[in-house]
Image (cartoon, grey):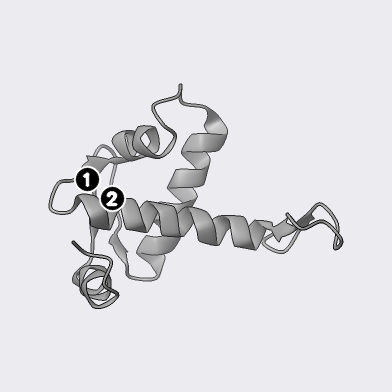
């Protein structure tokens, strides 16, 4: 599923679902790290990333998948129901070293 292309090879906007997942994971991680030490619940994070638009399944699913993948790789703590989405120390240190932290 991760490698299903959208468009065709000649299309300059040609991206795979894997690329989309990577972009979403980076958006989630960056937002969590930018806001740290402030924290967000999953609902707040979803609203934050979709510009406050009404929640739709695809928006919620996209953010939940990104958080699950980032937690699986050790960059976020796995949140429970209604718990805060928190970065790990490793993610915070990476953010500092990358020069992204303000």
Compared with 84, 96 (above or below) is below
Q: The N terminus appears in which quarter of the rendering?
A: bottom right
Q: Is residue 46 found left or right of 78 in the rendered image?
A: right
Q: Which residue was labeled with disc 2?
A: 79
- Mark 2: which secondary structure? loop
Q: Residue furthest bottom?
A: 97
Compared with 93, 1 (above or below) is above
Q: Residue at x 18, y 45 (%)?
A: 39
Question: Nearer the observer, disc 1 or disc 2?
Answer: 1
Image quadrant of residue 13? bottom right
Q: Which residue was labeled with disc 1?
A: 84
Q: Earlier in the sequence, mark 1 or mark 2?
A: 2
Compared with 27, 9 (above or below) is below
Location of residue 14 in the rendering, given as x and y in whole percent from the top left corner: 75, 58
- Mark 1: which secondary structure? strand
Location of residue 66 in the rendering, given as x and y in whole percent from the top left corner: 45, 54
Q: Is residue 48 found left or right of 40 in the rendered image?
A: right
User: How busy is the neighbourhood of tag 1: few (under 14 within 10 Å), some, or many (20 plus)?
Assistant: some
Q: Residue at x 63, y 62 (%)?
A: 18
Which one is nearer the viewer's eye here, 76 or 36? 36
Count of residue discs: 2
Q: Residue furthest left?
A: 37
Q: Is residue 81 found left or right of 60 in the rendered image?
A: left
Q: Residue at x 82, y 56 (%)?
A: 11
User: How busy is the neighbourhood of tag 2: few (under 14 within 10 Å), some, or many (20 plus)?
Assistant: some
Q: Residue at x 48, y 51 (%)?
A: 65
Marks 1/2 in contact by CB < 8 Å: the verdict is yes
Compared with 60, 99 (above or below) is below
Location of residue 19 in the rendering, given as x and y in whole percent from the top left corner: 61, 61
């Amino acid at each position: 599923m991760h490698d299903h292309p959208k468009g065709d090879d000649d299309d300059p906007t040609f991206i795979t679902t894997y690329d989309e997942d990577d972009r979403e994971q980076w958006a989630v991680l960056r937002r969590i790290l930018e806001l740290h030490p402030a924290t967000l619940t999953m609902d707040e994070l979803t609203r934050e990333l979709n510009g406050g638009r009404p929640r739709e399944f695809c928006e919620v699913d996209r953010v939940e998948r990104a958080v699950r993948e980032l937690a699986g790789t050790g960059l976020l703590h796995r949140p429970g129901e209604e718990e805060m989405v928190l970065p790990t120390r490793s993610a915070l240190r990476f953010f500092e070293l990358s020069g992204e932290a303000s």
